[in-house]
Image (spheres, rainbow, N blue to C red):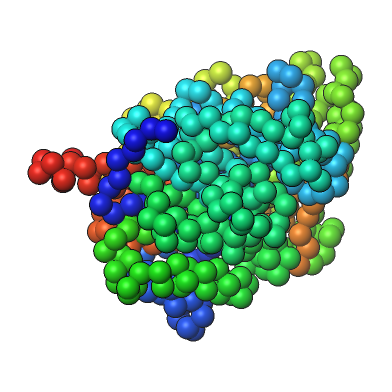
């Protein structure tokens, strides 16, 4: 067992899936989230952190942990198509869609291939970087977990037939301290009430065990997943879900002599991963069925092998979708025109070898861009850009920098999605209130959905308590370097050397 060094103040990151700024602020102001209120009032609050794109958990968590967008980490979404192997890749969406693609295949993708095959070896996770510096880390309840510690995971007897592993066991590269529901637990007798992963109570109990036994590593990443499912069906203002998670955070802070003492002994970060856009109630108005939009083409069926005659493949991530063009004889223009005719589609993007092109079903015109030009955006990124800025709601600041409106960090995030995988494809984005559908795709009438580039899903809250340091920019891709520095600067201080 390696000997790890431990910082004076371990860093704990609590990721509350689908936590949004306005519901959080309402919960705090009305006294329904006292723990989060304490952390906000005794720390720094950022209401508009820019998430990754698509705004789906596996892509977002991959960006957070690697500090890169999908063009580098290569996790394109919860649902995508491998054009090289001609296979649908699903990490677990709706039951009907997952069942048709193949339950065993989807479970294998989520539990093994995501971390061990799909995530690029050209990037490193914060877990891998900390381990190289002799610092341990923990992952609790996250399906994105790649570290450099070989660990044996085991499916319970009832689930073994749903996996592709002999006797339901496999070796994966994880964090030194690792918890993932029934597959790996920190507490020997801990029992998750959800099969695939632990609910908010299980996650909090695993964290509290580490604190109680003085086994907190240098960095701990915990995910509370329950809120997302509630919001999908109840809408974005589900304060009760926040209250339930806050109770678990209260119990965690209560392990210390005082809540103030918890801030002296640890650095606490609380973040949402994506927001939600409320969905309308009328199926005809809300649901964009891509099969009807492009009905003149031969579309691959998810439950069958892809045939040579198939021209298109759809991979829907709720409010965004990839449209893959398999037929080499097909040009993109006849596909883009019917998409532009739908006023519910606000972004239609594609690329060639040199440029990215964006049009819209709502705004007239086209914008063309590529990296490396003379125009800088507010994040210091350089672009060559031409055309109608209104298509992506871009504006020039007084300093002649590009500022983003309803599509935060739109250029980098679109570039990331369009270079996240091989093949020829179009990215489409639904306007707020609408979402895409293909074969057996789940949708959320009168509830809420995410996945798109829009600020409703892209801007989420971050709380930092126990440190006055801040990330260089309020973006998920800047958090890995920030957290790494929070940990490593403490060792510099211990030696009496100046902090970087």
Residue at 46% from the left image edge and 38% from the top image edge: 176
Residue at 78% from the left image edge and 55% from the top image edge: 443
Is residue 184 visible from the viewing direction of this image? yes
Is 136 located above or below residue 189 in the figure? above
Q: Is residue 457 left or right of residue 373?
A: right
Q: Nearer the viewer, residue 473 or 334?
A: 473
Is residue 294 visible from the viewing direction of this image? no
Residue at 87% from the left image edge and 24% from the top image edge: 305
Is 155 located above or below residue 15 in the figure? above
Q: Quadrant of residue 450?
A: bottom right
Q: Nearer the viewer, residue 392 or 312?
A: 312
The quadrant the N terminus occupies is: top left
Q: Is residue 477 left or right of residue 344?
A: left
- Percent x, y of residue 7: 27, 47
- Percent x, y of residue 2: 38, 32
The quadrant the C terminus occupies is: top left
Is 451 located above or below residue 385 in the figure? below
- Percent x, y of residue 205: 54, 61
Residue at 40% from the left image edge and 51% from the top image edge: 215
Q: Nearer the viewer, residue 168 or 21?
A: 168
- Percent x, y of residue 122: 47, 22
């Amino acid at each position: 067992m390696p000997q790890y060094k431990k910082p004076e103040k371990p860093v704990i990151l609590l990721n509350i899936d689908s936590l949004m700024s306005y519901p959080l602020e309402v919960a705090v102001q009305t006294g329904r989230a006292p723990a989060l209120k304490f952390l906000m009032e005794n720390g720094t609050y950022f209401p508009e952190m820019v998430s990754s794109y698509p705004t789906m958990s596996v892509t977002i968590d991959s960006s957070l942990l690697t500090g890169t967008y999908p063009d580098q980490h290569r996790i394109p979404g919860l649902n995508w198509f491998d054009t090289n192997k001609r296979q649908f890749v699903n990490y677990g969406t709706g039951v009907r869609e997952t069942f048709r693609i193949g339950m065993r295949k989807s479970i294998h993708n989520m539990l093994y291939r995501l971390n061990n095959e799909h995530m690029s070896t050209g990037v490193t996770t914060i877990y891998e970087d900390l381990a190289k510096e002799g610092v341990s880390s923990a992952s609790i309840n996250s399906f994105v977990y790649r570290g450099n510690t070989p660990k044996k995971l085991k499916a319970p007897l009832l689930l073994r037939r749903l996996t592709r592993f002999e006797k339901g066991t496999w070796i994966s590269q994880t964090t030194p301290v690792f918890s993932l529901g029934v597959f790996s637990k920190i507490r020997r007798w801990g029992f998750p009430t959800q099969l695939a992963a632990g609910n908010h109570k299980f996650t909090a109990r695993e964290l509290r065990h580490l604190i109680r036994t003085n086994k907190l590593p240098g960095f701990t990443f915990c995910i509370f997943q329950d809120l997302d499912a509630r919001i999908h069906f109840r809408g974005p203002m589900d304060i009760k879900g926040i209250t339930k998670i806050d109770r678990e955070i209260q119990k965690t802070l209560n392990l210390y002599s005082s809540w103030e003492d918890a801030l002296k002994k640890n650095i606490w970060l609380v973040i949402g991963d994506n927001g939600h856009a409320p969905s309308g109630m009328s199926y005809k108005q809300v649901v964009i069925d891509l099969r009807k939009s492009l009905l003149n083409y031969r579309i691959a069926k998810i439950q069958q092998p892809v045939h040579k005659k198939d021209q298109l493949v759809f991979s829907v991530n709720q409010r965004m979708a990839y449209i893959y063009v398999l037929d080499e004889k097909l040009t993109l223009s006849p596909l883009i025109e019917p998409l532009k005719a739908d006023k519910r589609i606000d972004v239609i993007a594609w690329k060639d070898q040199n440029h990215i092109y964006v049009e819209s079903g709502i705004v007239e015109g086209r914008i063309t861009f590529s990296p490396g030009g003379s125009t800088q955006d507010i994040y210091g990124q350089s672009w060559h850009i031409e055309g109608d800025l209104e298509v992506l709601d871009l504006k020039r600041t007084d300093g002649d920098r590009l500022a983003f409106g309803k599509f935060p960090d739109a250029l980098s995030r679109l570039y990331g999605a369009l270079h996240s995988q091989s093949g020829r494809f179009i990215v489409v984005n639904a306007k707020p209130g609408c979402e895409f559908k293909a074969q057996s795709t789940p949708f959320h009438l009168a509830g809420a959905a995410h996945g798109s580039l829009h600020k409703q899903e892209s801007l989420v809250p971050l709380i930092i308590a126990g440190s006055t340091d801040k990330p260089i920019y309020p973006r998920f891709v800047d958090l890995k370097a920030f957290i790494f520095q929070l940990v490593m600067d403490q060792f510099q201080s211990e030696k009496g050397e100046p902090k970087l």
